[in-house]
Image: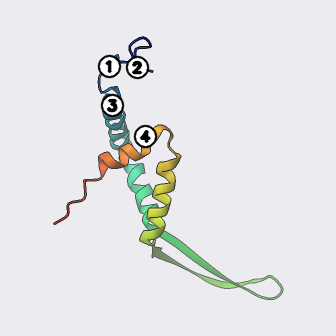
């Protein structure tokens, strides 16, 4: 949309990088503005509450237990990828790259 229809040249050089930087800054601002909710959601993602109920053959609840477990890394990775792909125009992937430092190999 930012290309000149006649020459095909960009009307604004590096428009995609500028837009990505702007969107990432806005996302950082929203994360800071809603820091408490973000922290609570992170905690909710990292742990799962497991409840087991014992039921008699007549359908009566005969007790149960609850415990909190740490969410498996594979589940977090799978769900993160699913969420990133659901955000349109690659914004989720770009923001994830913005927040994640590049991998350093020795």
Mark 3 and mark 2 lie on one chain; the one further toward the N terminus is 2
Mark 4 and mark 2 lie on one chain; the one further toward the N terminus is 2
Which quarter of the figure has residue 13? top left
* Pointer 3 residue: 22
Q: Left or right? Give the position of 22 relative to 46.
A: left
* Pointer 4 residue: 91
Q: Are marks 1 and 2 in contact (CB under 8 Å)?
A: yes
Query: Mark 2: which secondary structure?
Result: loop
Q: Left or right? Give the position of 19 relative to 90.
A: left
Q: x, y percentage for residue 46? A: 42, 66
| Mark drawn on residue 102 | none
* Pointer 2 residue: 2
Is residue 46 or residue 12 the one in the foreground? 12
Mark 1 and mark 4 lie on one chain; the one further toward the N terminus is 1
Q: Give the residue at x 30% y 53%.
A: 100
- The residues tagged by marks 1 and 2 sit, at their Cα atoms, a distance apart of 7 Å
Is residue 64 or residue 97 the one in the foreground? 97
Q: Give the residue at x 40% y 14%.
A: 4
Mark 1 and mark 2 lie on one chain; the one further toward the N terminus is 2
Query: Mark 4: which secondary structure?
Result: helix
Callout 1 environment at 10 Å: few (<14), some (14 to 19), or many (20+)? Answer: few
- The residues tagged by marks 1 and 4 sit, at their Cα atoms, a distance apart of 20 Å
- The residues tagged by marks 3 and 1 sit, at their Cα atoms, a distance apart of 15 Å
Residue positioned most to the left = 106
Is residue 25 or residue 104 the one in the foreground? 104
Mark 3 and mark 1 lie on one chain; the one further toward the N terminus is 1
Question: Residue 48, relative to residue 87: is it above or below?
Answer: below
* Pointer 1 residue: 12
């Amino acid at each position: 949309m930012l290309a000149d229809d006649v020459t095909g040249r960009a009307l604004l050089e590096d428009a995609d990088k500028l837009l990505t930087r702007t969107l990432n800054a806005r996302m950082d601002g929203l994360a800071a503005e809603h820091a408490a909710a973000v922290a609570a959601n992170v905690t909710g993602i990292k742990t799962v509450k497991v409840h087991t109920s014992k039921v008699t053959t007549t359908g009566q609840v005969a007790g149960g237990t609850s415990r909190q477990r740490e969410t498996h890394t594979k589940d977090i990775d799978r769900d993160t990828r699913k969420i990133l792909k659901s955000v349109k125009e690659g914004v989720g992937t770009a923001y994830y790259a913005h927040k994640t430092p590049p991998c350093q190999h020795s």
